[in-house]
Image (tube, helix red, strand yellow):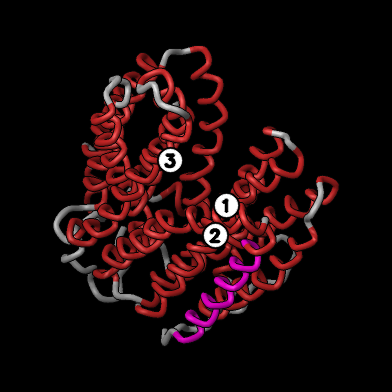
Amino acid sequence: MRWYLTGVVVSGFGTTAMWLVSGIWVKSLTGSDGLAALTAFALWAPALLGPLLGTLADRVRRRPLLIVLDLAAAAVLPALLWVTSADRVWLLFAVLVLYGAQGAVHDAAEQALLATGFAKERLGSVNGWRMTAGESMKLIAPLVAAGLFARYGGGPVALLDAATFALAAAAFAAMRVREERPAPAARERGAWRRETAEGVRLLAASPVLRPLVAAGAFTMLLAGVNGAAVYAVVDQGLGRPPAYAGVLYAVQGAGSVLAGLTTGPLLRRIPERLLAAAGLALFAAAAGVRALPYEATALAASAVIGLGMPWVLVAAMTAVQREAPAEAVGRIAATANTALFVPNAVALAAGAALVTTVDVTLLLPVLAVAGLAWAAVTAAAPAAARAGNAPEEAPAEPGRTRS
């Protein structure tokens, strides 16, 4: 566990730094706001192929795959030292797409490794610690990245990110995890496509996973609209300059760290569906409160958003790791990640249009009502889903998979 969390921390630091700097880098070289915004899309785009990419995590042992992926990223990132003028920005976009694809496979392999390498009753705690480790880096990395870029440019940030990937590979190499070698993959034509489709089918057919992933997807859809509205909240509601949004995001990050620390204890007492419902309800209520023109309520709402949203995501992630067959965890996890995070990217674009036509004092309360309604539906899950969604302390029968 120590080595795993070390890998998560160092790679999370580098990833957050690179994510922040890529947009600033493009903006500084081209002067284009549109191209700068496309850097986020370049990172997100490979998530659309998540189910296909996640199949790789089920065809090989996961720990060696994590090591190879991190070393490959460490080898590619130094190429960005060549990006010194506007006519070379295409290379940055190409690396960002590869970066996003690497992240999609890496996350699927991580979740599959956790599912097979740790006892099921510990998965909630492990995922909570993983969330805390990742979110804590978001409080530190932006300051370091912004300072490095302002003084030396984007090249040193790319080298820093490459170094963190190399350190993460070393941490994963030091892990002692017993993994069984996967069954030989079918090599006939269309086998990869059939395996990918099987992962999608297994997720869609699960009465436990389907409502949890749907709740997570809806949460991220609302989060995209909420994120697009943050500058309108800062400007119109609080009368602050745009940079004040950074304060709200920092407070939200602190809430997410708390969410990671509380997830494990909560999942030992309540089912995943109730944690997801509670998280969605907290997120929705806090988003609605943001419509009030008071700084104290805006700060409190940001903290509650940071607390509630990770609960939904960790609940869905933990359920996938517990419920999915061991030989298909990678595919199902990658499919779930696509379902969870693509709506956020879509909603960010749609929300940008909405905030120009709908006042946030109306938009955010409507968002809150929709989120609270979905939370109620999730909490009142059908009996079929409740049967397999027991708290951590109720282990499955030996030799059987929960359903």
Residue 246 is labelled as 3
Observer-nearest of 366 and 183: 366
Q: Residue furthest front?
A: 151
Distance between the alpha carbons at the discs numbered 1 and 3: 15 Å
Crowding around mark 3 (Cα neighbors within 10 Å: few <14, some 14 to 19, many 20+) is few
Query: In the rendered structure, which amino acid carries the disc numbered 2?
Result: Thr
Can residue 103 be seen from the camera position used here?
Answer: yes
Q: Marks 2 and 1, Cα distance to the nearest angstrom?
A: 6 Å
162 is within the stretch colored magenta:
yes
| Front-most of residues 144 and 167 | 144
Q: Counting residues from the N terminus, which is met first, the one under dot 1 or under dot 3?
A: 1
From where the camera sits, is residue 381 visible?
no
Q: Is residue 282 left or right of residue 127?
A: left
Q: Return the mark for residue 15.
A: 2
Residue at figure coordinates x 18%, y 56% from the top left: 266
Residue at 27% x, 52% y: name it: 259
Please name the amino acid that badge 1 sits on.
Trp
Choose mark 1 or mark 3, whichever is in front: 3
Q: Are marks 2 and 1 in contact (CB under 8 Å)?
A: yes
Vertical placement of 336 versus 346: above or below? below
Q: Is residue 294 magenta?
A: no
| Residue 247 picture location, percent across and down | 38, 40
Q: Residue under circle 1?
A: 19
Range of residues picked out in magenta:
157-174
